Image (cartoon, rainbow, N blue to C red):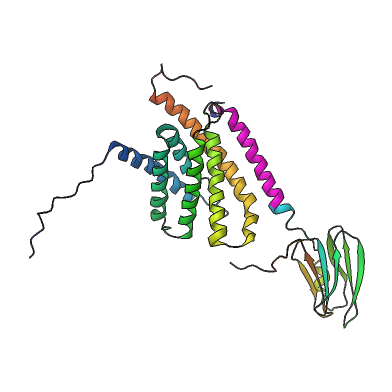
Amino acid sequence: MTPLPTEKPPIFLSITGTDRQIAGLATAAIGLSLLDAAIPTPLPGVKPGLANIVTLLVLARYGWGTAAWVTGLRVFAVSLLLGQFLTPGFFLSIAGAICSLFILALGQYLPRRWFGMVSWSLLAAFAHIGGQLVLARLWLIPHDGLYHMIPIFSLTALISGTLNGLIASHLQASLDLHVTSPSEATPAS
Amino acid sequence: MRWLQGIQPGDIGLFSLAILAVLMAFQIFWQTDGMGEWAVVRQNGTLFAELDLHKKQLIHVSGPLGETQIEIGGGRARVASDPGPRQYCVKQGWLSRNGEIAICAPNQVSLQIRGRQKAYDSLAY
């Protein structure tokens, strides 16, 4: 029997408060993504994208870095849970996520007085399908016939982007009421 | 409306822009592309005539069984009459979309619709 190697000190990963926070938020996003996957859709690519509600709220409350972490973890974890890791669907998710995070990186600097969550959501939704279409055209379906799907995908982006934005903005307003003290909670507008 | 509380003017602007973009997408990718522009008539496999779908006319093509009549006009075309025994190409009726084809095999005449771009007659995924 070989003795257990006790000489090496055990490795500890220190978990910071931010880690816990990101993990918790990512869990919420993963839950919504799974709900998304459970909804039957007529076409691949046509789905509500409910997890983006979490991304939007995180972006508004904790900043872009946290939002990117939450989104990245969500894409990886959901692909593992659904058995899609490294499948075309996974790469499409990644492409969509990267493009929408990129546009949100710019969109977060839009003046908040004029542009709310619905703007972010619409920008992200259109960037998402844009990224997916580019990847699909370059790699998965290298044929111009794919362009016939653009109207359907953009209509999906319009509807889901608007609805997710409205939900996120509603949640943001109610979170503000709960989190901040009544004296701080000034009505928006 | 409680749901519309957080809406800013820019949101409405961007939303309108998005609607416009979607409508344009439908216009660009669905309306123009699928419609045919030309009727391509073949006799015994060789090109007999290429005709504008919007010019009203009736053409006669002769084959081994007799004469096939093709009617064109109003952006569509059909085989109006054919001497073939089963009349498949006549029963197909009006053709208007890019890539559609009616084949009168016994009389060796075919009518195909062509758009601005050549369409595939079948796609496999």
Visible in this render: residue A50?
Answer: no
Residue occupying image coordinates x 67% and y 69%:
B122
The answer to which quarter of the image holds residue A1 is bottom left
Which stretch appears magenta? B4-28
Residue occupying image coordinates x 77% and y 69%:
B101
Q: Position of residue A123 (x, y in %)?
A: 55, 40
Viewer-proximal residue among A103 and A21: A103
State yes or no: residue B91 in magenta: no
State yes or no: residue B6 in magenta: yes
The answer to which quarter of the image holds residue A181 is top left
Q: Position of residue B118 (x, y in %)?
A: 73, 65
Chief secondary structure of the magenta span? helix
Q: Exactly how many numbered labels are in the figure?
A: 0
**Relative to B88, A48 lies left or right:** left
Residue occupying image coordinates x 45% and y 33%:
A60
Picture layout, residue A99 above or below residue A82 = above
Picture layout, residue A62 above or below residue A144 = above
Visible in this render: residue A7?
Answer: yes
Picture layout, residue B7 above or below residue A16 = above
Q: Position of residue A29 (x, y in %)?
A: 42, 43
Picture layout, residue A22 above or below residue B116 = above
Viewer-proximal residue among A67 and B34: A67
Q: Position of residue A16 (x, y in %)?
A: 27, 38
Give the farthest residue toward the top: A183
Residue occupying image coordinates x 61% and y 62%:
A143
**Relative to B40, A32 lies left or right:** left
Give the farthest residue toward the bottom: B64
**Relative to B40, B2 lies left or right:** left
Q: Quadrant of the C terminus of chain A?
A: top right
